[in-house]
Amino acid sequence: MVLKIDDIDETRAPLLDHLIELRTRLLRSIIALAIAFAGCLYFADEIFGFLVRPLTAAFPQGEGKLIYTQLYEAFFVELKVALFAGFFISFPIIANQLWAFVAPGLYAKEKKAFLPFLIATPVLFTAGAALAYYVVMPTAFRWFLGFEGEVGGLDIEALPGTGNYLNLVMQFILAFGITFLLPVLLLLLNRAGIVTRAQLIGARRYVIVAVVALAAIVTPPDPGSQVILAVPLLLLFEGSLILMRFQEAGMPKTEEPSEDEQISGDEADAQPGEGALPD
């Protein structure tokens, strides 16, 4: 088959349209992020003050302070705070632009199937981040401050740096937020036919070990935060198994051909087609 020049030009047009559409969506996302970043930079002190509250609550009343050891450290902390908060604020717009680019290529039933996952993703991430902020971080910080005291006649005092503290807070929030997306990942894999509910039930003991190991890796090295992450993850895993039961019940089942159908199919394959020369 030989393509004509006109046919080649027609195939180029949709590709160029998609590239232009992609550029437009990316530009809108960048503008949304830039506007959110500028607004958050103006309120960077208030946002960082909100992030510092768990540490303030962990210190004895009237004690504790944050320091910075580099002249530029406080400035870069404000930039990171503004970028971190700006991304969260602009994420709905960025996600909307991504969906607007992908959705035209999906069937109506595929859009309907993806809608619950699009709603569940920010909800579960926010739930994980809230658990980290309101429960895990105060508990972990009190445990860390428990190492203050006296050793060998010298006082051991916690003097956390602003940059290190912000990195720790971001680690907590991202670790809990992302790992709380476990049900979304499992249900997507199940809908794609990669894993089944029966397979996950059979591998439950290995999942428990993997969850405990993951909690030990993504959280700071205190046992409290590891337990607080591992327990909700196991509950989310069990909840995913329950949801998979309903999801698999609504999915069309592929029936295997019977023996008679297989035999007739083999006989049809064995017969030479029209115009074929006999051996």
Image (cartoon, rainbow, N blue to C red):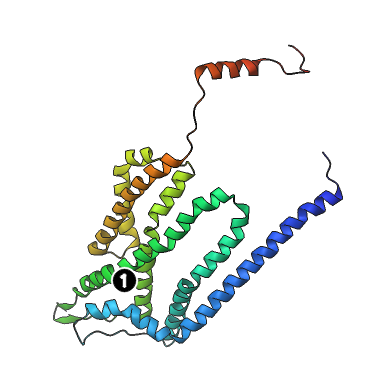
274 displayed left or right of 193: right
246 displayed left or right of 37: left
Q: Quadrant of residue 158?
A: bottom left
Write the residue at 86% across / 50% down.
5
**Could you say where residue 60 lies in the image, as x and y percent from the top left?**
18, 82
Write the residue at 49% across / 69% down.
91
Q: Considering the image in quadrants, where does the C terminus appear?
A: top right
**Could you say where residue 173 lies in the image, as x and y percent from the top left?**
36, 68
Q: Nearer the viewer, residue 169 or 93?
A: 93
Write the residue at 67% across / 64% down.
21
Q: Quadrant of residue 49?
A: bottom left
17 displayed left or right of 110: right
Q: Given the current orientation, which residue lies at the most extreme top position?
A: 279
Q: Nearer the viewer, residue 251 or 272?
A: 251
Secondary element at tag 1: helix
Residue 195 is at least partly visible in this image: no
- Vertical comparison of 157 with 123: above or below: below
Q: Quadrant of residue 121?
A: bottom left
**Could you say where residue 231 lies in the image, as x and y percent from the top left?**
26, 56
Q: Residues within 10 Å of mark 1 (few under 14, many from 20)?
A: some
Residue type (three-letter) at the residue carrying disc 1: Tyr
Query: In this figure, which residue is indicated by the disc labeled 1?
Result: 133
Residue 179 is at least partly visible in this image: yes
11 displayed left or right of 243: right
**Could you say where residue 140 lies in the image, as x and y percent from the top left?**
25, 69
Q: Considering the image in quadrants, where does the N terminus appear?
A: top right
- Vertical comparison of 274 with 250: above or below: above
